[in-house]
Image (cartoon, rainbow, N blue to C red):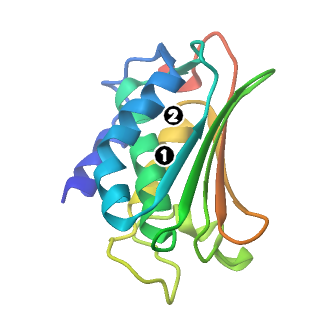
Amino acid sequence: MKQLLSLARTEEVSHKRFEDLDLTAAVNDAAASVVHEALNRGVSMEFNMPETRVNVRADPGDLSAMLINLLDNALRYTREKGSIWVTVVDSDEVVLRVEDDGPGIPDSEKQKIFERFYRVPGTNGSGCGLGLSIVGESAKRSNAIVEALDRPGGGTVFCVVFGSMEKNPAQG
């Protein structure tokens, strides 16, 4: 039920407040919401982020929902006592990478995973298939592109590239 409400909030455009937000602070806040589960499963989380502020233009709720769902997804599908790596790069574009060492996603499923209620056939774990739908919708509203890639050595990399522009198109 919580995921359905989050998706509905993500899709509601009229209440969005686009602001310059600090991505590194938002990543730290999102990590705080999943760290307990990571500790319980013995999953290590490694962060490689600039020590300075990295601005992205987004709605605070959308950015939070995107980050929490990316981290939760990585945690859900990484192996027991596995690893998650989170990287923020601030160059010409701001790039967020969330990597896990789980089973990976077949190429034939990579576009489908952003659809509502879709789960890769044969995957273990709980969930209703809304988390990555929320990620996709939040990214779109934040003028960002999200993509699932293969991680060398096994696992998945979710790469989010934030656009740079004066006014977000979702603002109208």
Which quarter of the rendered picture does the N terminus lie within? bottom left
Q: Is 90 positioned to the left or the right of 6 in the image? A: right
Mark seen at residue 120: none
Q: Nearer the viewer, residue 87 or 132?
A: 87
Q: Which residue is mark 2?
A: 141
Q: Residue at x 69, y 78 (%)?
A: 106
In-image side of 96 versus 68 (left or right): right
SS of the residue at dot 1?
A: helix
The residue that label 1 is drawn on is: 137
Question: Residue 130: x percent and y percent?
Answer: 38, 62
Q: Is residue 17 above or below residue 8?
A: above
Q: Sort mark 2 into few (<14), some (14-19) or many (20+) by Cα contacts within 10 Å.
A: many
Q: Is residue 73 left or right of residue 103?
A: left
Position in image of residue 110 (x %, y %): 66, 68
Residue type, mark 2 in image? Arg
- Report if the CB atoms under discs 2 and 1 are less than 8 Å apart: yes
In the rendered image, residue 82, in percent from the top left (x then y), is placed at 53, 67
Disc 1 marks a residue whose amino acid type is Glu
